[in-house]
Amino acid sequence: MKNKTILITGGSSGIGLATAKKYAKRQANVIIVGKTEDKLINAVNEIGEKSSYYTVDIANTESLKKLYKRLKSKGIEIDILVTSAGLGKFGRAQEVSEQDYDLVMNTNTKGTFFTVTILKPLIKRGGHVILISSFLASKYIPLTSVLSASKIAVETFTKIFAREFSQDNIKVNAVSPGSIKSNFMAFAKPTEQQQEKLIAYMPKIPLEKRGEAVQVADAILYLTGENASYVNGTILSVDGGLSIA
């Protein structure tokens, strides 16, 4: 990974930040992207000197186009693109507001799609794209209709991008995290009643423990390393067996 360029959306916290730190330890040049500059600055301080940031709203295609132009003007090419930015809202289908629906779909689905397609010309031949899905794409749990649908779309993008980008020898894979300790729930802000229902609806994790963001980061590093040179178009579950529960 030495001197390779890694761009990570949602890189100021959670899985994105854990992944950025992993690549930085391997002497890669890490670029993180997010909406909140204060968080990005703090994250860069944690990641180290070979890191930088851009303030971008991935739900806004004009913001992504500006990022593309800035990177191109600096002659920056991307070896590995990780689309870690995402969010969720919970509620029964009839309780979901149009605002929350748009927020989730515009970030997780539209944002992921256009992050990849707009930045694609900057990805080097032989590079990698890693998308972040969720166990919710295959587990149909009440209160998660919009979030689950957004991640099903991400898994579809993974398969089709892998086929379309093969002509440029760019591999596209996804990781599907299970119940991971991160700041995701803090943003989603489920009510106490919703939390109780989500816990009741959740299947038991076979390994009987929640995962860590760093464990998902390890899977991302695997998919972009030499040991996964023949892995393409796959969804790698990192969930302690939750997807088979």
Image (cartoon, helix red, strand yellow):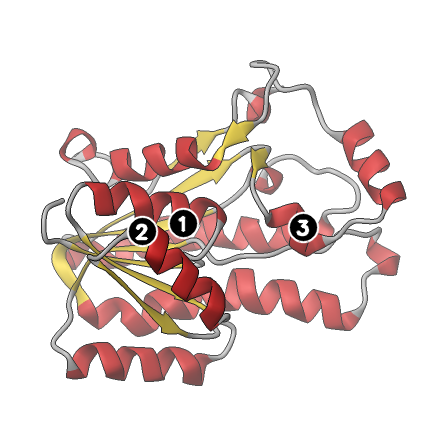
The image shows residue 22 at horizontal and vertical percentages of 29, 41
Q: Which mark is residue 165?
A: none
174 sits left or right of 191 in the view? left
Query: Looking at numbered disc 1 in the image, what kind of residue is underneath it?
Result: Leu
Q: Which residue is mark 1?
A: 17
Task: Give me the C-alpha separation between circle 2 and circle 3.
Answer: 22 Å
Q: Which residue is mark 2?
A: 47
Work out whether 128 lies above or below 65. above
Residue marked by disc 3: 186
Alpha-carbon neighbours of circle 1 within 10 Å: few (<14), some, or many (≥20)? many
Placement of 187 over or under 192, stated as above or below: below
Task: Give the quadrant of the C terminus.
Answer: top right
Earlier residue among tags 2 and 3: 2
At a point 17% along the width and 29% down the height, the residue shown is: 227
Q: Nearer the viewer, mark 2 or mark 3?
A: 2
Residue depicted at x 89% and y 42%: 193
